[in-house]
Amino acid sequence: MQLSVLLALGGASVAATAAFAAGGTPALSGVVAVFASVFAVYNFDRLADKSPAEGRSTPERRALTQRWSTVLRVCVAASALLALVLGASVSLAAFAWTIAFPLLGMLYALPLRAGGRVYRLKDVPYLKPFYVCACWTELTAVSLSHSGLDATPAIVVFAVFVYPRFFISANLGDVRDVEDDAAAGIRSLPQRLGRNATLRLLEVVHWASAAGLLLAVASGVAPPAMLGLLVPTAVAYAIFRAYVRRPDRQAFFTDLYDLELVLYAPSWAIAAALTTG
């Protein structure tokens, strides 16, 4: 979890599920490319951020990143190169969609100089959860381009469903990092709303996303197999409640929350087998 391997597996699972939602079979190149991209982007972000406040809320991860910094740099470069090679080997469209995620990730973390001042998108007030969720939702297009699949109403439903799911995860991280962000001058939604109000908002998003999924399946817009995603949603809600009850373990539960994404593809596959068999 500390080196974002679980998160990268979650990205691979999202890619596979996107192909299922589009009525096809996931391409191995797309699944591996997404895994490599997520691993590269998140570890690059932690290596590139030299703020003294970075890692204050996750000291174990910060120490691990510093201790293995040389190895991580090699792994990040190799992962990014692998993703780009896989994209280029499929098609120009697959390459374009594949390179978009690491480029957006680097753009978010790297300092940009303009008008004699240095800016980072990471420092733009309240941007993070919306930007990160858009980047993650883009991974569905990576999967479709590698698999040669077209967009369908079901894939649109899936994208609309996962965006608020990513929003919950991103804001849990911001609740955890609220002291880091304050020390670095970064303004986030949890700083603005406060911990309790943010958690209440996220609980509403939990139930609203699940209700939207049920409505999409009941109306026939999405296939019955999409109901399988309610299993990871329930697992995520259990982790969320543990997060609320144990603020002293919030770093652990924030990283464990990525298990929801990992469970997407197997839950869909099992639900599809049950509904067709």
Image (cartoon, rainbow, N blue to C red):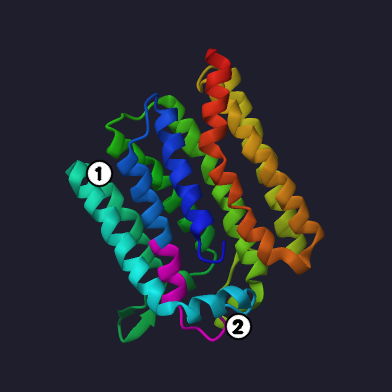
Kind of residue indicated by mark 1:
Ala
User: Is residue 169 left or right of 83 when viewed as pictured?
Assistant: right
Tell me the crowding category of disc 2: few under 14, some 14 to 19, or many 20 or more residues within 10 angstroms, Cα based: some
Q: Which residue is mark 2?
A: 183
x 64%, y 75%: residue: 57
Q: Which residues are magenta?
A: 40-53
Residue 244 screen position, x and y as percent: 77, 57
Residue 35 bears which disc, if any?
none
x 62%, y 52%: residue: 168
Residue 118 versus residue 105 in the image, above or below: below
Q: Is residue 47 magenta?
A: yes
Q: Is residue 49 magenta?
A: yes
Label 1 – label 2 distance at C-alpha: 40 Å
- Res 194 visible: no
Residue 133 screen position, x and y as percent: 49, 52
Say whether marks 1 and 2 touch (CB < 8 Å): no
Quadrant of the snapshot with the N terminus:
bottom right
Q: State how many labels appear.
A: 2
Identity of the residue furthest to the right in this view: 245
The secondary structure that dominates the magenta segment is helix
Query: Quadrant of the rendered structure where residue 212 is?
Result: top right
Residue 94 bears which disc, if any?
1
